[in-house]
Image (tube, rainbow, N blue to C red):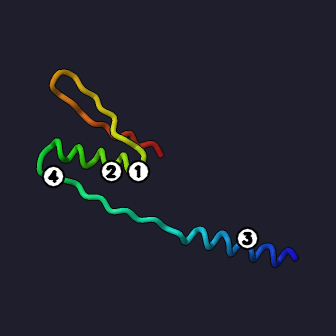
Amino acid sequence: MKCILFKWVLCLLLGFSSVSYSREFTIDFSTQQSYVSSLNSIRTEISTPLEHISQGTTSVSVINHTP
């Protein structure tokens, strides 16, 4: 009985570990604004939007990576 249960659990774990998900994104390098917009849309799609820091006419987008 233990052997059958172990094989069943092992099959489930191996089955779920082989599932993958792939997405394709493009980055527009034509202007600085389009580049930042491309990165922001990518970060939004992966649920981590860019933070914006601005002072006067200067604006910077920051990616915080925390493992």
Classify residue 53 by image quadrant: top left
What residue is drawn where x is 15% and y is 25%? Answer: 57
* SS at badge 1: loop
Contact flag, marks 1 and 2 (Cβ < 8 Å): yes
Question: For the image shown, how many numbered marks are present on the structure?
Answer: 4
Look at label 1 and name its amino acid: Ile
Place of residue 64 in the rendered image (x, y in percent of width and height, measured from the top left): 38, 39
Please identify the residue farthest to the right as the structure is shown: 1
Cα–Cα span, label 1 and label 2: 6 Å
Single out the mark in the foreground, 2 or 3. Answer: 2
Check if mark 2's residue and mark 3's residue have beta carbons within 8 Å. Answer: no
Q: Position of residue 27 (x, y in %)?
A: 23, 54
Look at the numbered disc 3 and give the secondary structure of its residue: helix
Q: Looking at numbered disc 3 in the image, what kind of residue is underneath it?
A: Val
N-terminal-most mark, 3 or 1: 3
Q: Which residue is mark 1?
A: 46
Q: Which residue, given by chain and number where applicable, does mark 2 sit on?
A: 42
Taking the spot 65% from the left edge, 69% from the top edge, the residue there is: 13
Which residue of the protein is positioned furthest toward the top in this rendering?
A: 56
Q: Secondary structure at mark 2?
A: helix
Q: Name the residue: 17% across, 28% down.
A: 58
Q: Circle 4 sits on which residue?
A: 29
Q: Which residue is label 3 attached to?
A: 9
Classify mark 4: residues with Cα within 10 Å, few (<14), some (14-19) or many (20+).
few
- Mark earlier in primary sequence (4, 2): 4
Q: How would you rate the neighbour count of disc 2 (Cα within 10 Å): few for under 14, some for 14-19, many for 20 or more?
A: some
Give the amino acid type for the residue marked by disc 4 in the picture: Phe
Pinpoint residue 59: horizontal percent, then vertical percent.
21, 30
Under mark 2, the amino acid is: Ile
First along the sequence among labels 2 and 3:
3
